[in-house]
Image: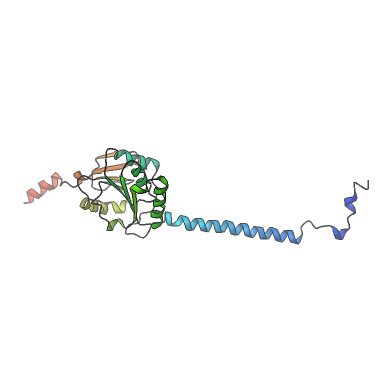
Amino acid sequence: MSELNHGTNIPENERRPTNAPGESGNRKRWGLIATGLVGGSLVALYAVATPFVTPALRKVCLPFVPATPAQVENVLKVLQQRTGTLVDIGSGDGRIVIAAAKQGFRAVGFELNPWLVWFSRYRAWREGVNHSTSFYISDLWKVSFSQYTNVVIFGVPQMMAQLEQKLQADLQSSARVVACRFPFPTWAPDETAGEGIDTVWVYDAKAFKTPRAGSERGTTSEN
């Protein structure tokens, strides 16, 4: 019996309290460290993510919304028989430019957000198409698109009318324009592909650069 009960005979002053001050302090210390690590991680994540999702300062606010796989597929589909150069206006993370380069285009992206441009360059290098792609930090309103035969734009309604005028002035008659998410306000598309948010509208420059028959008749009658 003495062997079974020897634990109960430890002197009172030698027994360790259940909630020793040292253990309680350690728990508090580790709790503060864990809280600091979680808080620091959230701040770091916010600092990294914010430049990607916040639009850079520009005339028309154009937030970064990545193209869906279906949108990329539809863009490539309507450009299947095309060759030459391609420009993506507001190229975001570069996925359209990179996908076009893999299809044989010499592809260029213009984007005002420098973080997205640097990330696009890295992605192009990682995908092995950095030699056939270029990305520039630039305001689209200060760029001439006259040298490009294929133009892709993910726009917003507020900018489409003004961009329509710019492209009509810039582009050669052999160019093709692919609008994603929103169509141009006055141009009639030559074809469409996809449905819903993945719809793309295709415009051949020879159509929108040719004076409309109605306009010609109106001019003649006035003269």
At x 13%, y 48%, the residue is 215
State whether residue 153 appears in this view. no
Q: Position of residue 92 (x, y in %)?
A: 38, 51
* Numbered-mark total: 0
Question: Looking at the image, which residue is at 70% across and 59% down?
Answer: 26
Residue at the image position 43 percent from the left and 57 percent from the top: 51
Q: Along the line of sight, which residue is nearer the eye, 111 or 192?
A: 111
Residue 39 versus residue 76 in the image, above or below: below
Relative side of 87 to 1, left or right: left
Residue at 38% from the left image edge and 40% from the top image edge:
70
Of residues 146 and 215, the one nearer the viewer is 146
Q: Which of the image's four quarters has the N terminus?
A: top right
Q: Is residue 43 visible?
A: yes
- Could you tell me residue 8's position as x and y percent? 88, 52
- Percent across and percent down for residue 18 are 78, 56
- The residue lying toward the viewer, choosing from 169 and 160, is 169
Residue 134 position, x and y percent, is 34, 51
> Residue 22's image quarter?
bottom right
